Image (cartoon, rainbow, N blue to C red):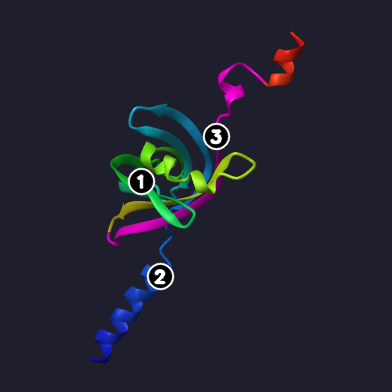
Amino acid sequence: MEILEQAKNFVAEKLANVPVPEATVTDVDFKGLGLDGITLLAKVSVSNPYSVPIPIGEIVYVVKSAERGIASGSIPDPGSLTANDKSMLNVTVKVPHSAVVSLVRDIGGDWDIDYLLELGLIIDLPVVGNITIPLSYKGEMKLPTFSDFFGGNSSENAEK
């Protein structure tokens, strides 16, 4: 029985020291406005320490504002991580209009919406299996003002 216990400990120790990919959210940009809502583009840098490409099984996301979830979704099978290199992933996040409208109370004098983007990269490592790399990014969405729609600020238009 002692040999079996030693074997379990050996395997557990080796798996604990296995390098795993590391990821960071580098930026989140406003991508567009459509009939279905607002689209954000999150740029995620992921480093792969292995000499073989690693498949990403899925990317899941949740967007929160004022401590409540306003959007969630997943991107199935987004591709693979390049071997021994950093990969840049573009994660498209959709926020429905109804969620944005419900955030009106969060808009202050600076005309923005504070948000938290939580991402989970589900990566399939050989032998180990699926692991999830959790990421989060805090930011703010600046909302357009009337002057943005009508070509500049009012003082410029008054001088012309």
Is 131 colored magenta in this rendering?
A: yes
Determine the secondary structure under disc 3: loop
Q: Earlier in the sequence, mark 1 or mark 3?
A: 1
Please tell me which residue is depicted at 38% across the width and 70% down the height of the picture.
14
Please tell me which residue is depicted at 44% across the width and 28% down the height of the picture.
32
Please tell me which residue is depicted at 64% across the width and 42% down the height of the picture.
109
Q: Which label belongs to residue 140?
A: none
Residue position for label 2: 16
Query: x, y percentage for residue 120?
Result: 38, 53
Residue 3: which quarter of the image?
A: bottom left
Please tell me which residue is depicted at 73% across the width and 16% down the height of the picture.
156
Could you classify mark 2 by the number of other residues whose Cα lies within 10 Å: few (under 14), some (14-19), or many (20 or more)? Answer: few
Q: Are marks 1 and 2 in contact (CB under 8 Å)?
A: no
Query: x, y percentage for residue 129?
Result: 27, 59
Query: x, y percentage for residue 65?
Result: 47, 51
Q: Position of 43 compared to 79: left or right?
A: right
Locate the C terminus by quadrant. Answer: top right
